[in-house]
Image (cartoon, rainbow, N blue to C red):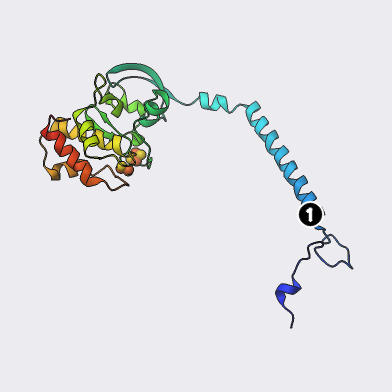
Amino acid sequence: MTNSRDSNSVSNEKVGDSDKPSHFDLSRRGFIGGTSAALLAAKSTSVKAQENSESVGVEPEVANVPKTAITVTVNGASHQTVVEDRWTLNEFLRDHLELTGSKIGCNRGECGSCTVLVDGEPVYSCSTLAVWADGKEILTVEGLEKDGQLSVLQQAFMEHNAPQCGFCTSGQLMSATALLEENPEPTVDEVRHALAGNLCRCSNYNAIVEAVMDASKTGGA
Ligand code: FES
Ligand code: FES
């Protein structure tokens, strides 16, 4: 019985029928040599394409991106600057002001790790354009500490082990700060409701809520 796998088998040295040389008669060495040559040719083409794209000027397209002059106050410091209209607030804060406390988890308005306060309201900075912040006051997690002292809420987070991996912590802190500024004595349900837009992948929700409740009893945000 003929095994179809055997009949199609490929010897280590030859592909095809050795008695009938043809364009299918390809030695392994020849195959590898040919493949290497093809790869080198492809690489050369790719390098040339890259050189061509640089010479035709990708930069001018980037330079033509619409930009807008804005004035924002970030953590008490005023910034008059020009931003590209396509920048998110998170890009502006992290990449241009080097305030890397707000994190990018999902980059699509679902997790809350990028939360900052705009005029006291928590917003997802991944889903907010920097130009929309013109004339506004931004507070990031870097602005919670005063004179080298953690805020009451930050201290409570430490005491209750609220940060586990810590990735969500800055967003949790900002949402909880906004809550305590508006409602210094929230109920547990009100805390949970205020933090509903901040996911914690370590599932440390109980400790986070306890920390916020503790902060509310010992001096607010
Ligand atoms: S990174 Fe902004 S909501 Fe997730
Ligand atoms: S502490 Fe890890 S995601 Fe919240």
In the displayed structure image, the side of residue 71 where residue 95 appears, left or right: right
Quadrant containing the C terminus is top left
Q: Could you say where residue 94 lies in the image, as x and y percent from the top left?
A: 39, 28
Viewer-proximal residue, 148 or 12? 148
Which residue is painted at 22% across and 31% down in the image?
A: 155
Residue at mark 1: C-beta within 8 A of ligand 1: no
The crowding category of the residue bearing disc 1, from other C-alpha atoms within 10 Å (few below 14, some 14 to 19, many at least 20), is: some
SS at mark 1 in the image:
helix
Image height check: is 172 above or below 138? below
Q: Which residue is mark 1?
A: 31
Give the residue displayed 74% in from the left and 42% down from the top: 40
Q: Position of residue 161 (x, y in %)?
A: 25, 40
- Where's ligand 2: which quadrant? top left
Quarter of the image for the N terminus: give it.
bottom right
Q: Find residue 63 and report its horizontal and vertical position in percent.
A: 51, 23
In the rendered image, is residue 111 in sight? no
Q: Is residue 77 above or below residue 11?
A: above
- Res 50 quadrant in image: top right
